[in-house]
Amino acid sequence: MICPATRDEALTQLADFVPRAPLYARDRNHVIPGHPAVSRLSPAIRHRLVTEDEVAAAVLAVHSPDRVEKFVQEVYWRRYWKAWLSLRPEVWHDYLAALRALPDSPAVHRVEAADSGNAVIDHFARELVGTGYLHNHARMWFAAWWVHEARLPWEAGADFFFRHLLDGDPASNTLSWRWVAGLQTPGKTYLARRSNLEKYLAPDLLESLAQGLPDFENPRSYLPDIPARVPITRPELPAAEPDFQLTSGLWIHDEDLSPESSPIATHEFTAIIVGDNPSSRDAFAVPTAKRAWLDAALTDAATRAGRHWQLPTARVDGPDLAASLLSWAQNTGIQQIVTLRPEVGALDDALPQVTTKLAAAGIRLALVDRPQDLALRPLATAGFFQFRERMLKRTKPTESAKNPR
């Protein structure tokens, strides 16, 4: 398995990677079967089985910052994307609207079925569907071919990745595809070149996929209409702080699967429910393998939470998230449901309906933010490197994360 679905196993995988972290800058671009040069922890980080701070701190506890700078930088790219999109949520909603408006495309279906006619692209399509993972360099090559060579809509490619990637993230995935297409940094595209594939593909792969290389010989940008820079439209998050004088229940979802390491860890609850939004899995056509990984991760979170708070845990039941939470709250006598705030994405999109349905029955939905998220969010007003410099001045990995086990 690329990345385990439990926190303990993810921490073990992190510990195994830490000695190799100084080699990351040298080896990270090489696309090798099994991906030994990278941590393969992105699914665990995306769903917060482990946090960015824990990963960075585990590496920095052993190595000097200059030896692992590139790895730590890549860890925080994911947080930068989340913060950037949180300030500009309409980019996600515009993407969904454009995706819904796309006509059915036989060409898209052929690529997804590994029948594009290009050996390189078909290899990576099979790997993506079969494992739920692609090396970052392979993602860039694939997206560049999709947009600039095949001239397929970037939104359809982003959807293909989002459905299958275990680390599929509304921010990282959507914004990375926009970057390749020349939208995220207006007019600046990414092109996959044959020389780059020949440099970084493992020799055995390069030999077996050689017939696909001519398509990368002379890439040319396919530039869409270049938009203006996206303005910040949500400088502040909507307030929904908990009132712990109310009888409270804890809702754990797959956007943050380690509540026992969050600010709510010390609060008392009378009941716990675990689960995400079942209807969004269907809406995004999430495949069986990814659903199984998510369910295993949710089960692990339920086990840890039950042990931490000494409470039994229920599971979200039925296709309607709002109805499931309401029924659970009423059956347990809860006045308030507390959860860690999800980032921009499908679960966040479901919250207005959940909030309205609960409020009609006199039940509050309260959202809690991790302090580091709040600290870094306002820093994503421009590019990543400006974000990184501001982050280094204002924050550092938390002391409590230095020994995550």
Image: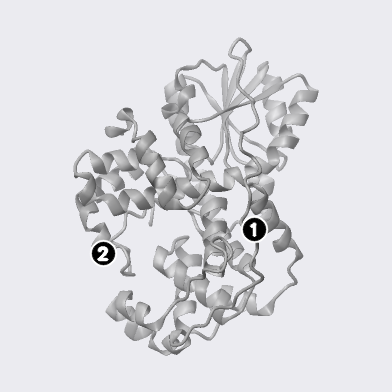
Quarter of the image for the C terminus: give it: top left
Q: Give how far across and how far down residue 353 sits, in percent.
A: 75, 36
* 272 to the left or right of 97: left
Quarter of the image for the N terminus: give it: bottom left
What is the spatial separation of the Cα atoms under label 2 and label 1, in whole angstroms?
34 Å
Question: Which is nearer the eye, 152 or 277?
Answer: 152
53 versus 217 height, above or below: above
Q: Give how far across and how far down residue 373 sits, in percent.
A: 48, 35
Name the residue at 53% across, 62% down: 185
Amino acid type of the residue that numbered disc 1 sits on in the rendered structure: Ala
Q: Which of the 4 quarters of the picture holds residue 260?
A: top left
Q: Secondary structure at mark 1?
A: loop
265 versus 157 height, above or below: above
Name the residue at 56% across, 37% down: 253
Name the residue at 30% across, 78% down: 199
Question: Which is nearer the eye, 386 or 206?
Answer: 386
Say the numbered circle drawn on residue 27. 2
Q: Which of the 4 quarters of the picture holds residue 54?
A: top left
* 240 to the left or right of 208: right
Instruction: Say if mark 2 contacts mark 1, CB within 8 Å.
Output: no
Say the numbered circle drawn on residue 285. 1
Q: Which sits earlier in the primary sequence, circle 2 or circle 1?
A: 2
260 versus 30 height, above or below: above
Question: Which is nearer the eye, 114 or 396?
Answer: 396
How many numbered badges does the structure rendering display?
2
Q: Give how far across and how far down residue 243 sits, in percent.
A: 61, 15
Name the residue at 74% across, 33% down: 323
Q: Give how far across and how far down residue 69 sits, in percent.
A: 28, 50
Amino acid type of the residue that numbered disc 2 sits on in the rendered structure: Asp
